[in-house]
Amino acid sequence: MAVSFSGIPPTSSIFAAYASVSAFIMLLQAMFHQLVPRQLQHYLLNKFHHLCKRRRRSYATIVVEERNRISTNEVYSAAETYLCTKIRPNIDRLKISKCHRDAAVSITFAQSERIFDRFEDVDLEWIFVSEDNSSNNNTSKNASKVFDENTNTVFVESNKRYFELRFDGKHKDKVLDSYFPFLLKSAESIEDEKRVIKLHTLASTSAYGSMYVWDSINLEHPSTFETLAMEPSQKKAIIEDLDRFVRRKEFYRKVGKAWKRGYLLYGPPGTGKSSLIAAMANYLKFDVYDLELTNIKRDSDLRKLLLRTANRSILVIEDIDCTVALPSRKGPTGGPNSHGHSQHPQNQFTLSGLLNFIDGLWSSCGDERIIVFTTNNKDKLDPALLRPGRMDMHIHMSYLTPEAFKLLAATYLTVDLHQDQRLSEIEDLIKILKITPAEVAEELMKSDDVDTLLDGVLDFLKRKYENALVNDKEVDNDEDGDEEDRKVISKGTDGGVFSTCAKCAKRRTRRGLMESGRSCGMVTM
Ligand SMILES: Nc1ncnc2c1ncn2[C@@H]1O[C@H](COP(=O)(O)OP(=O)(O)OP(=O)(O)O)[C@@H](O)[C@H]1O
């Protein structure tokens, strides 16, 4: 059968027609982008998109607005955080910003960007929309009120931002029941990773009738459990306790207790109490609230301040024994107290006010809270503060031990000291001297040369030892230890120097038996 091609135009004409149509489309496209406002572009494209897709299948759309009435919508913040990890290089426009207190820049989306995600077998398309209502006549109607948690004020924002999430409607249940919980959890761990720990301290402000508010800075304390010199078994016990605490959310709920834990750190100055708090904060990535009790005048002030602390935080009250003389629960109720504050309970700061916050009804206003008290004199504290449930773990920060010295030396010197002869000499002296990690850390900072440093530490310890001898001073006097654990440096009747336990020293002195060879087996010099 013969086929006639006579009706078909020549190839050159087809190409010419194709070129003109393409040019026309490009012109239309350019005009569309230049002349049509961006918002209208977005609207028309969306409509077009909807029309095309609706033909094929039914799509579901979920809108996630930035604001939920006047407060921030946590799902929006989580979506913003999560979707930043889904940004592909082909994305056209991004916004980058950094506040002066932020450690790193943050990247967010510019208008109408699309981000694609896949969860299990579901394809998801996110669109970021930002509507500027400032040019509208009915601005006040469209504008949203925003509550600024930092300044406790409400302001009007004309920009409305939201995400639209589109997906095949048949997956609606899976998206709501599984994808959103997954997104919230992912965002939480992303935030945790890049989280900058804050240190909140009290600052007075005249804006609220000269009261105290929390002011914050980044906590850049480098102390960690690795750098902390303390007995390895004690360190392990603290880390295990913290781990148990954070994973026991359900347990606390089941047994009907507020999800909080109290730690009392006690010991002489320079033994690492503050360093341990910083190590705990760095380990858990919890903010620290440093509460100076001398600034608190009334129980109600304390209540207001503590209600403004966040979950997953450590509330620290340092030197609890000397910051304030708390009127006791049974104390007098009339006349001014030692601070000149009124003695009317509602107008003063009392021990019961503080206890109420530690384990009373107010203590349950928050989750995952840690309270830390530090003191140099545990004996001076009211026993009511120390009972379990208030201070659950008492941590004794003691003088340097040989094991702790090894850790300190490993951090500061970063060389293996096992072979060094000076090490055993240093350890022997540390065993019998009352020496703080802070003192030795100071010595370890004095040079860049390891040999010079070790000689320096040894000299320093020998000087301390000589001093102790001259003053016939007890050494390694553990405030809590019984006499058998305490060592005394003494000069024997034969002129030798030895150390013995305090109990033996007393007994021997009474019996005039101070011979260096007959110490009770402790280090003999
Ligand atoms: N256990 C330790 N491990 C490592 N470094 C320590 C330790 N203890 C003290 N230091 C060093 O000494 C310095 C002071 O220690 P820190 O402030 O933690 O002691 P503190 O017990 O809180 O003292 P104070 O009771 O006077 O507040 C720290 O910056 C650190 O360099």
Image (spheres, rainbow, N blue to C red):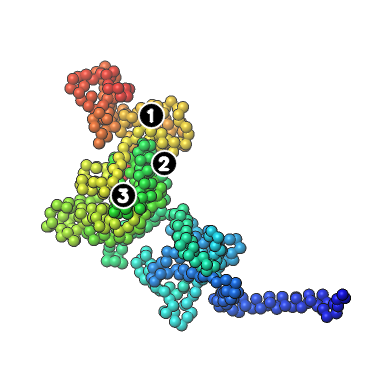
| Above/below status of 55 relative to 96 | below
| Above/below status of 455 relative to 305 | above
Tag 1 or tag 2, which sits nearer the N-term?
2
Residue 374 seen in render: no
Residue carrying label 3: 261
> 123 and 299: which one is in front?
123
Residue carrying label 2: 227
Q: Are marks 1 and 3 in contact (CB under 8 Å)?
A: no
> In the rendered view of the protein, which quadrant contains the C terminus?
top left
| Above/below status of 210 relative to 223 | below
On the rendered structure, is 205 left or right of 332? Answer: right
Residue 173 seen in render: yes
SS type, badge 1: helix
Measuring from the top left, give residue 412's x and y in whole percent: 44, 38
Q: Residues within 10 Å of mark 1 (few under 14, many from 20)?
A: many
Residue 6, picture quadrant: bottom right
The residue depicted at 45 percent of the width and 68 percent of the height is: 66
Cα distance, mark 2 to mark 1? 20 Å
> 341 and 284: which one is in front?
284
Q: Nearer the viewer, mark 2 or mark 3?
A: 3
Residue 70, picture quadrant: bottom left
Determine if the C-beta at disc 3 is less than 8 A from ligand 1: no
Mark on residue 413? none
Measuring from the top left, give residue 385's x and y in whole percent: 23, 48
Kind of residue sitting beneath label 2:
Thr
Determine if the C-beta at disc 2 is less than 8 A from ligand 1: yes
The residue depicted at 24 percent of the width and 28 percent of the height is: 502
> 503 and 79: which one is in front?
79
On the rendered structure, is 216 left or right of 13? Answer: left
